[in-house]
């Protein structure tokens, strides 16, 4: 039986802040053993969400 956690941000957020938060939530869940689904609200373009995710690789480089 599915379990749910709902996050609602009451303040307005920039697309950058939203993309960072959404990707952080996804990243935290990815590090669990559970099958999950994260759905964004559709207001931030998917390209912006993907660009934010790609930037993590640049920022977190080992060198």
Image: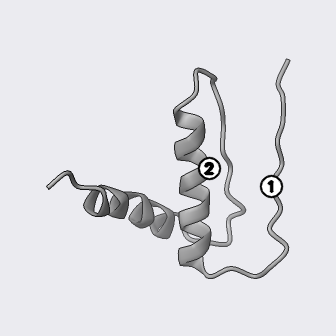
- Residue 16 lies, in percent from the top left, at 53, 76
- Mark 2 touches mark 1? (CB < 8 Å): yes
Task: Tell me the quarter of the image containing the C terminus.
Answer: bottom left
Callout 1 crowding tier (Cα within 10 Å): few <14, some 14–19, many ≥20: few
- Residue 2 lies, in percent from the top left, at 82, 24
Q: Residue at x 63, y 24 (%)?
A: 35
The image shows residue 28, relative to residue 12, as above or below, that is: above
- Residue 14 lies, in percent from the top left, at 62, 82
The image shows residue 63, relative to residue 36, as above or below, that is: below
Q: Residue at x 55, y 54 (%)?
A: 24
The image shows residue 33, relative to residue 54, as above or below, that is: above
Drawn side of residue 31 relative to residue 43, left or right: left
> Residue 3: which quarter of the image?
top right
Task: Tell me the quarter of the image containing the N terminus.
Answer: top right
Drawn side of residue 55 relative to residue 14, left or right: left
Q: Nearer the viewer, residue 51 or 23?
A: 23
> Residue 17: which quarter of the image?
bottom right
Which residue was labeled with disc 1? 7
Q: Residue furthest front?
A: 63
Question: Which element carries disc 1, helix, strand or loop?
Answer: loop
Question: Which element carries disc 2, helix, strand or loop?
Answer: helix
Q: Residue at x 36, y 59 (%)?
A: 56
The image shows residue 9, relative to residue 62, as above or below, that is: below
- Residue 7 lies, in percent from the top left, at 80, 55
Q: Which mark is residue 18?
A: none
Q: Residue at x 75, y 82 (%)?
A: 12
Which residue was labeled with disc 2? 25
User: Could you tell me how far apart the alpha carbons at marks 2 and 1 are, in whole angstroms?
Assistant: 10 Å
> Residue 51: which quarter of the image?
bottom left
């Amino acid at each position: 039986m599915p379990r749910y956690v709902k996050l609602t941000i009451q303040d307005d957020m920039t697309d950058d802040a939203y993309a960072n938060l959404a990707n952080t939530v996804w990243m935290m869940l990815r590090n669990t053993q559970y099958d999950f689904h994260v759905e964004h609200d559709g207001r931030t373009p998917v390209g912006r969400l993907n660009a934010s995710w790609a930037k993590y690789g640049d920022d977190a480089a080992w060198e």
